[in-house]
Image (spheres, rainbow, N blue to C red):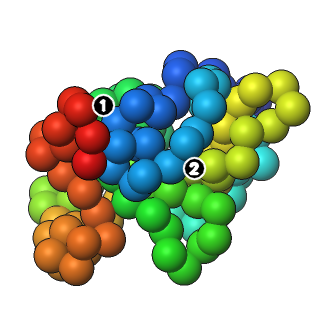
Amino acid sequence: MKKTLIPLELGPLPIEKINRALSLELKPGNVILPIANQQHAMKRHPKEYPYCFPYVGAAIQNPMYIGDDHRNHGKIELIGGLPGIKNRMLLVAINIEITDEGVYKVSSFYPVSRNKIDNRVRKKFLVNTYTINKKGP
């Protein structure tokens, strides 16, 4: 039997952390993972998808790193832990344009190597959320 997909509601986007980390002014809104974007992630990362999918919400709600996706304008990256896959973390790409319904959309998610994360932190493409001062960047 084929599994039916539904759009997933993943809770509020942590705009305070994101705005401080990236000097943005995002408005409050919930995050959804549309069906088409679930299918995209399945096709692009078929082996990793079952391991990553359960952790997408956690990576959004409690990201370890936040970054601006410089290659894809209008998207940010939230990176969280990925239990079960050694030396990898979960990258969740989110469109920062809020919809008329007041939601942000996950565009994709996939595992990234710890080395890639470390390199991007050194280049200041990613901000460690534990270093963000509550009063500003």
- Residue, disc 2: 94
**Relative vertical location of residue 8 with respect to residue 137 in this rendering, above or below:** above
Q: In the image, what residue occupies the spot 41% across and 42% down?
A: 18
The three-letter amino acid code for the residue at tag 2 is Ile
Q: Which of the two labelled residues, at mark 2 and mark 1, occupies the earlier sequence position?
A: 1
Give the left or right position of residue 40, taking residue 24 as reference.
Answer: right
The three-letter amino acid code for the residue at tag 1 is Asn
Question: Which sits in the foreground, 85 or 103?
Answer: 103
Residue farthest to the front? 135
Give the left or right position of residue 86, taking residue 53 as reference.
Answer: left
The answer to whether residue 94 is visible is yes
Quarter of the picture holding the N terminus: top right
The answer to whether residue 51 is visible is no
Residue 102 in the image: state x and y as whole percent: 76, 26
Residue 121 in the image: state x and y as whole percent: 19, 69
Residue 66 in the image: state x and y as whole percent: 34, 52
**Relative vertical location of residue 109 with respect to residue 8 in this rendering, above or below:** below
Q: Secondary structure at mark 2?
A: strand
Q: In the image, what residue occupies the spot 33% across and 49% down?
A: 21
Number of residues whose C-alpha sits closer than 10 Å to that of mark 2, classed few (under 14), some (14–19) or many (20 or more): many
Q: Quadrant of residue 87?
A: bottom left
Question: Which sits in the foreground, 37 or 118?
Answer: 118
- Residue, disc 1: 62
